[in-house]
Amino acid sequence: MIDPVEALNSKAIKELHEISVQEFRPRGRKYDENADMPVENIQTLHDLGWLTMTLPKEMGGKGSNLDTDDPATYLQAIRVVARGCSGTAHCLQVHNHTAWALNDLGTEDQKERYIQPMFDRPFLGSFVGSEAKRSHMYKMNTTATPKDGGFILHGEKNYATNGPTMGFAVIFAAIAGVENYLDNHQMVIIRPDMKGVSVDLDWYRPAGMRAASSPIITLDNVFIEDKDVFGAPGAYPKGRYQGKYHLGFAANYLGTAEGMFDWYIEYIGGRGKNSDGIIQMRTGEMKIALQAAEALFHDAIRAWKTKDIVEAELLSIAAKSMAAQVGFEISHKIIHASGSTAMFDNLPLARYIRDLETHVLHAGHDRSAQIIGQAAMGENFDSTLQR
């Protein structure tokens, strides 16, 4: 197994860190202003092979995901990209999670049509489960009604990350007439040019994570041919795929917090405050907290090879929650140590903070803690849930 520390210290990850800080971070203001996709960053990630990092090496990918002997490289890549741009890191995460599942569950025809183009150009995919007024993460309001040769799809999905430039999206729907979500949860593949598919690019205007452009997709009487039905009913919850993705969020939270801290160290040094005893103490507190979050993150990665799946999922939830808490904690200390000028728009600190605060809401920080509590108290729990 490639250990998390070994992966973090690899030449490729160190080079990606430098690109993220030197190139991705300066572009952040431009993407943030208009909630634009980070297209230059995505192109760079494609050119360096990071958009196919979860795919098998024999296919041309980097062969890194939790099911391989390298569970760490793809997570460290998300982490170091988040040090420069949280939104770009989320685009990278969602796309690679989509590619990973598609390679696992897709037909040979689907792999040919939707995976192979990823090696030629930034052909982005998206997982789109989110929708308004869901009562449960796996219970969909979007419906897939069986019809000869496929399904008719109706519904509205939101937070479709990579939506403005995506080549395809995996949509979660409920098969009409089937009650239990383990039997009715159905994935289908849609393309932006399909009849009845519309993408609302104006909807996505959050306070943070604006570079991870995630519009609404409306599905109005969309016919999905059998060739674009993805996996068997219930394949996603039964395969515990959501539990495999906890660490992608943890990597982003941790990387964002580290990027904020590293920038703060540069800023404080430039203002001649290194000898201030109070600032030294606060800086030490922040460094200790970041090291604790890193240690738990690395332990959670290792757990996927050393513990059973539920233990690994619970530890991953804990790592995700810890990274978020540490990010919140150090952001407030950085603000007070740096002073008000550090929050000006021409500097990245405010974007780091807004990205962190916004992104944690996506994964459900309180829900994470509740699941850990349920497990500790011997109550029923589902460690795959995000929210």
Image (tube, rainbow, N blue to C red):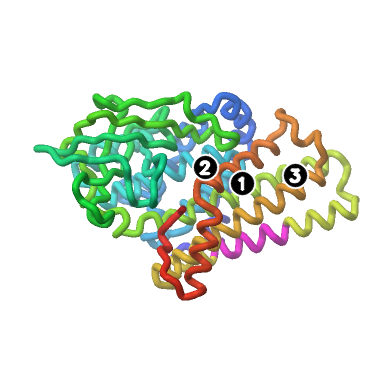
The residue at the point 40 percent across, 72 percent down is 308
Residue matched to label 2: 89
Q: CA distance from mark 2 to mark 1?
A: 9 Å
Mark count: 3
Q: Quadrant of residue 82?
A: top right
The reply to whether discs 2 and 1 touch (Cβ–Cβ < 8 Å) is yes
Q: Is residue 108 above or below residue 308?
A: above
- Direction from residue 145 to residue 155 in the image, left or right: right
Residue matched to label 3: 264
Label 1 crowd (10 A; few <14 / some 14-19 / many >=20): many
Q: Secondary structure at mark 1?
A: helix
The stretch in magenta equals: 287-298
Report whether residue 95 is seen.
Answer: no
Q: Which numbered disc, 3 or 1, marks the residue that appears first in the sequence?
A: 1
- Residue type, numbered disc 1: Thr
Residue 292 drawn in magenta: yes
Residue matched to label 1: 256
The residue at the point 38 percent across, 39 percent down is 126
- Residue type, numbered disc 3: Tyr
Q: Is residue 60 above or below residue 27?
A: below
The residue at the point 50 percent across, 35 percent down is 212
Q: Which residue occupies the extreme left position in the image?
A: 148
Q: Which numbered disc, 2 or 1, marks the residue that appears first in the sequence?
A: 2
Q: Quadrant of residue 379?
A: bottom left
Q: CA distance from mark 3 to mark 1?
A: 12 Å
Label 3 crowd (10 A; few <14 / some 14-19 / many >=20): many
Give residue 240's mark: none
